């Protein structure tokens, strides 16, 4: 008769639970970037373009300024196992979500929601409606491929 005693399983389990979010950070970032890019591309397609009127236009009224300002930014918190992507018009070409009051980012808000005397043109909503059906599949596909690459690198002894 043989008796086998395995020690340290609880410690191993705890360590694996701690490292899992760190291993998932790159695949999550890659997947969020992919769906963010899909949404960004669709939003640029849906964005209205100021036709220009031959008059002297300032920077804010440059044809395509709103469309060209649309971008996305990804944030991942490995310790919390969470991430998100922000998509929309950037402010002065900077990162999405900075709090400034310059165009075309603020301008995009008025175009999307409208204002007194202007009904609005919900281009971001149309973009969301166009991509929402494929986001989960795209996220899963990219996450899985990236996770496989991370695990393959770890198996070869690389970080």
Image (cartoon, rainbow, N blue to C red):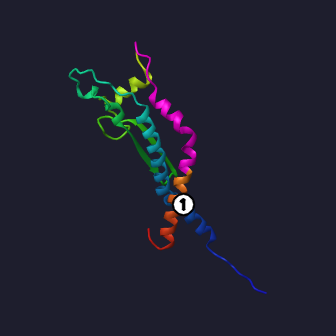
Is 135 rendered above or below residue 3? above
Rendered image quadrant of residue 65: top left
Pointer 1 local density, CA inside 10 Å: few below 14, some 14–19, many at least 20: few
**Most prominent secondary structure in the magenta stretch?**
helix
Quarter of the picture holding the C terminus: bottom left
Residue shown at the point (49%, 54%) measured from the top left: 79
Q: Residue at x 32, y 34 (%)?
A: 91
Which quarter of the rendering shows the N terminus? bottom right
The residue labelled by disc 1 is: 20
What is the residue that sits farthest to the bottom in this orientation? 1
Q: Is 136 left or right of 84, judged from the image as shown?
A: right
Percent position of residue 74, x then y:
43, 46
Residue appearing at x 35%, y 28% in the figure:
49
Secondary structure of the residue carrying numbered label 1:
helix
- In the image, residue 26 lies at what x, y percent? 46, 57
| Camera-side residue of 140 and 67 | 67
Above-or-below relation of 134 to 107: below
Q: Residue furthest left?
A: 56
Was residue 117 drawn as part of the magenta stretch in this picture? yes
Tally the marks: 1
Q: Nearer the viewer, residue 31 or 100?
A: 31
**Residue furthest top in the image:** 117
Region rendered in magenta: 116-139
Q: Residue reaching furthest right?
A: 1
Q: Toward the viewer: 94 or 16?
A: 94
Q: Quick check: 53 left or right of 31?
A: left
Please state if 2 lies on the left or on the right of 110 as rendered.
right
User: Is residue 42 in the magenta section?
Assistant: no
- Residue drawn 42% across the image and 35% down it: 45
Where residue 71 appears, as percent x and y from the top left, is: 38, 40
């Amino acid at each position: 008769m043989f008796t086998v005693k395995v020690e340290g399983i609880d410690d191993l389990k705890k360590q694996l639970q701690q490292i899992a979010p760190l291993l998932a950070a790159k695949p999550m970032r890659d997947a969020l970037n992919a769906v963010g890019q899909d949404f960004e591309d669709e939003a640029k397609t849906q964005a209205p373009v100021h036709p220009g009127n031959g008059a002297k236009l300032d920077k804010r009224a440059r044809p395509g300024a709103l469309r060209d300002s649309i971008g996305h930014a990804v944030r991942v918190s490995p310790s919390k196992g969470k991430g998100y992507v922000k998509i929309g018009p950037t402010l002065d070409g900077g990162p999405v979500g900075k709090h400034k009051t310059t165009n075309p980012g603020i301008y995009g808000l008025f175009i999307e929601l409208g204002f007194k005397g202007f009904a609005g043109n919900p281009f971001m909503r149309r973009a969301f409606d166009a991509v929402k059906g494929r986001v989960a599949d795209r996220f899963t596909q990219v996450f899985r491929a990236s996770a496989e690459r991370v695990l393959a690198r770890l198996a070869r002894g690389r970080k």
